[in-house]
Image (cartoon, grey):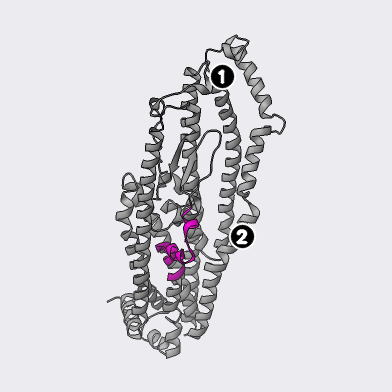
Amino acid sequence: MSPVRAIAGHTLRLWWREGRLPVVLLLVGALGLLAATLSIQRAAGSERDRIAAEAADRDTFANQGARNPHSVAHFSRFAFRPMGPLATLDPGIGPYAGVAIWMEAHYQDPANLRAAEDRVELGRLADLSPAWLLQVLVPLLVIALGFDALAGERERGTFPLLLGGGATARTLLIGKAVAMGLVFGAPLLLLALAQLPAAIGRVEGTTDLLLRLSIWVLAHALYLGAWIAVALAVSLRMAQARSALVLLLAAWTLATLIAPRLAVAVAEAVAPVPAAGEFSSAIYRDLRDGMDGHDPADRRRDAFRQQVLAQYGVERVEDLPVSFAGLALQEGERYGHLVFDRHFGALTDAYREQERWRRIGALAGPLPALQQVSMAAAGTDVSHHVDFMAQAEAQRRIIVRTLDEDLIRNGAGQDMAYLADRSVWERIPEFDYVLPGMAELSPRLAADGLLLAAWLLLATWLASRAATRAESAR
């Protein structure tokens, strides 16, 4: 039997006799089961609601009766965001970002129907997820097992005996790390695999799903590995287990509670996002007065009327072979697209900038970097939400253009009095959200992945230095 294997086995037996290992396994098992169950139930309920809402929306839109196409464009449809492929592992911003967008004429609406708004205070239990368990609670359990893994040997007087028996400090370190890796690695894999059956139905093909799951598991393995190395390094350097515990708890508080919140505060200060009312007012002002502030809507409409009359060689709107109302509406949509692209593009840029600034929190601990990778792999980060909004906006423009074009062709002389039947809006394709592939998103996660790897390397180096110091002090 190799020394590392013997030390790992001895460590596990010692923790079991002390009663700490059963408590840790019970906590991880119970909370893991609760988190997995809540996550799967939450996802299943959300998907049932989405499917029912889509069916009701589709039926209502199809059976609205004969109407003017522009009235239909105002009545319009909803785009519903499906659950992220691994949202059961990490809900991310999903409960706060909104799941439905009304695709009405003249305006690009933000996403609404946020699950977090419907929760009572006791409903905060629904925030429990496998990601939260692994990212916040498990590092505490790592500290509970690791703070005296080596400092305790020194206090009991067994550390010199182990070194005198032929073992090196490095061997002891690796053996203890293997034991902790077995204790916490198994729950990581089980939590991930438990969500797989529920995720398969939300992704076309298994390649992308397996890639997402692999990235998610690997990122959390790097994170837990860093905590294990830090715990053992501190335990090896401290003369007393109590001192090691205090230092590790301080490190956990800084890395998991203070640094991420501080990073968010800095990101919001450096790249502020306008309030909802301010954002809507700015869009309305540009639509009314022009993007330069000197091109009001009535002047644009008069200029467009003269352009259309000249194009068709007539002097009156009534003599046009097409519906001027339809043409004017389509021109208004074209100008609106410029305004919406400008403001929503700036909003997206602000979100991206905030993501970059949040990485400064990774200087005090690996959690901010892990959260970015975890949410991206789960399909619940800002990038996925922005992609959903972009696809919904593209669908909105298809709906409005199809209806305006029918009004233009068939509403000459009638304009808003013209009525179309359901065959017109039945030509509009259904909204089908296409999930972006993880392979194309991965390059954006390179910086966060490197930060996680850097933290693991730093923690390993600290542990190695502590082992070298212990061996030189023999």
Task: Please report whichever mark, 2 or 1, sits nearer to the chain's N-terminal start.
Answer: 2
Circle 1 crowding by C-alpha within 10 Å: few under 14, some 14–19, many from 20 = many
Question: Residue flagged by tag 2: what amino acid is it?
Answer: Ala
Task: Farthest residue to the top: give it.
Answer: 313
Question: Residue flagged by tag 1: what amino acid is it?
Answer: Phe
Q: Name the foreground residue: 75 vs 25.
A: 75
Lateral position of residue 441 relative to residue 186, left or right: right
Q: Quadrant of residue 264?
A: bottom right
Q: Main secondary structure of the magenta part?
A: helix
Q: Name the foreground residue: 333 vs 228.
A: 333
Q: Residue at x 57, y 33 (%)?
A: 337
Is 134 magenta? The answer is yes
The residue that mark 2 highlights is 265
Q: Residue at x 59, y 32 (%)?
A: 336
Task: Examine the rendered structure and indicate whether residue 420 appears above or below residue 364.
Answer: above
Q: Quadrant of residue 292?
A: top right
Give the CA distance from mark 2 to mark 1. 51 Å
Q: Secondary structure at mark 1?
A: helix
State which quarter of the image contains the N terminus. bottom left
Kindly indicate whether the residue at mark 1 contacts the one at mark 2 (C-beta within 8 angstroms).
no
The residue that mark 1 highlights is 324
Where are the magenta residues, as a range? 114-138
